[in-house]
Image (cartoon, rainbow, N blue to C red):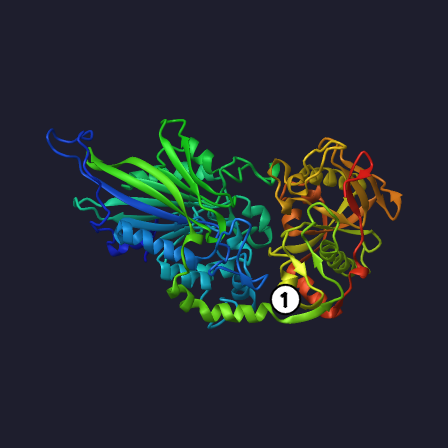
Amino acid sequence: MPLNRRGFLGRSAATGAGVALAGGAVAPSAVAAPGTAPGKRPRRYSFTVMGTTDLHGNVFNWDYFTDREFDDKDHNDVGLAKISTLVSRVREEKGRRNTLLIDAGDTIQGTQLSYYYAKVDPITAARGPVHPMARAMNAIGYDAAALGNHEFNYGIPVLRKFQEQCDFPLLGANALDAKSQRPAFPPYSMHRLRTPHGRDVRVAVLGLTNPGIAIWDKAHVQGKMTFPGLEEQAAKWVPRLRSMGADVVIVSAHSGSSGTSSYGDQLPYVENAAALVAQQVPGIDAILVGHAHTEIPEYVVENKATGKKVVLSEPLKWGQRLTLFDFDVVWSKGRWRVERVGAKVLNSNEVAEDGRIVRLLGDEHEKVVAYVNQVIGTSKAAMSTAEGPYKDVPIIDLISHVQAETVRAALAGGAYAKLPVLSQASCFSRTAKIPAGEVTIRDAAGLYPFENTLEARVLTGAQLKDYLEFSARYYVRTAPGVPVDPAKLTNAEGVPDYNYDALYGVSYDVDIAQPVGSRIVGLRFEGKEVDPAAEFVLAVNNYRASGGGNFPHVAKAKQVWVNSDEIRNTIISWVKAKGVVDPAEFARVDWRLTRAGTPVF
């Protein structure tokens, strides 16, 4: 498919797809549309744009960390094999040529399947494999996909190779070359849908990604790419697409709809800007929303300039849902105009996996299953993260201990060797476990599902106190004597588990009866009250160090060491080197929840 100076000529335009009567036309209205000659019925056409987002490397309904079929409390299913079945049903119902299929990003990171083909058997190697996500999405017949921030986790070479392997464009109108400030990826794709009326409907898909890439993947993109705001770039491109003859403009945005940011004032751009784009930029008909991992079947936003209703939809992550945007257009005054847009989601747990996709990628799946089940050591005791969000549990201490030990060894003999080393860690998954007995790669990797790397930053005692106070906003304020339900105690104000940090190496209480900002009590190091002026080295992941979560001080703190290897691999290597994991060597109760001095648990 040829790339031109203005964008990307999509599959439908290149092949002339879009001419099927089945499900294509709707019953004519008795009232003539504007511009229709008296006595003539208006020409109408209907089509559907399907959308996924945040697939995160899920092809099959399989959890590589538990080595069994995926399941959660809502009995959702995941994976492109399920999505493929849904897509086939929609195409059969609507007519293949009356549909498009797009994605809103975060495709190549998240499972051990995607990790394996980025790191273990990398697609960038000479005669390397084709990425399973590219093979699956090509087979299903995607028409376009926006870039997500996690596309950059493995570096630009891996992303470029993935882009080369896709039969559809990866779109990013606000992913710019750092030197030329021109788009580093196709900004948009244009698709023609043939109608029964001899007039094609031209559908433009504008891709927008997340400005936070500049912070979260700074090591990969600094000096190479820049990522301006979504509203700014949409305002630039939407009028161009309309002037190029687009009858319908859809935005595929890897950006949530809440209007919030997790990186504070470090960037002048909003992280979750999809609704702002709808409000501020005229000319958009619908937005496929990504990034936030929430389910929004249909959300209508009014454009401030025109009063036009813009329909947003966000399907649930990992292939759990498929969004359907149903469009009705009418021929009026020499062009197609959108008469109605509606959105809904389909649940992938209602269908079986597509056997075609299962057969296509069965060998890759088996390779990864064998890889993650390699035994790397043994554990003297079983450990679990189940209580990790509200208790100091040994399995989270394991992460922090490995991080602190790694940083301490790296700083040995240097200018910062005498400073105490502390460590931060979060409960990334409430279902991660280390069994008693044999420990496999999947057990260790399950503790750290993200591709974060490790850094060392210098903070003062006062800054550590601020850091912990900010973290403690995670808990719902609960008065003394009120019954405590652990299921309702956490995630106050929507703070996710991965944005609650516990510190290893200092001791403190978190008084949940107090207001946010006044909860940290008795902060001590080696039994003594922490001096606000004292300096400490904090072992911290690169997401947090670069400003992810908007924690105070750490992003501007002095960096004294940085590592390029994933923390997950550091943990795996540590277990291999030790041979035996003994919680007695690292487990400690550094923090606890209290109310007026009385422990909650």
What's under tag 1, amino acid-wise? Answer: Ile
What residue is rendered at 74% in x and 70% in y?
579
Residue nearest the observer in this picture, 106 or 96:
96
Which residue is at 23% across, 42% downward? 45
**How many numbered marks are there?**
1
Left or right relative to 254: residue 480:
right
Name the residue that disc number 1 marks: 441
Residue 507 is left or right of residue 225, and the answer is right
Q: Is residue 332 above or below residue 161?
A: above
Residue 407: quadrant of the picture? bottom right
Asked whether residue 121 is in view, the answer is no
Can residue 460 be seen here? Answer: yes
Looking at the image, residue 158 lies above or below residue 344: below
Residue 104, percent from left and from top: 44, 48
Q: Looking at the picture, how far across and down is residue 577, in whole percent?
A: 73, 69
- Residue 601 vs 279, above or below: the answer is below
Which x, y percent locates residue 28? 18, 36
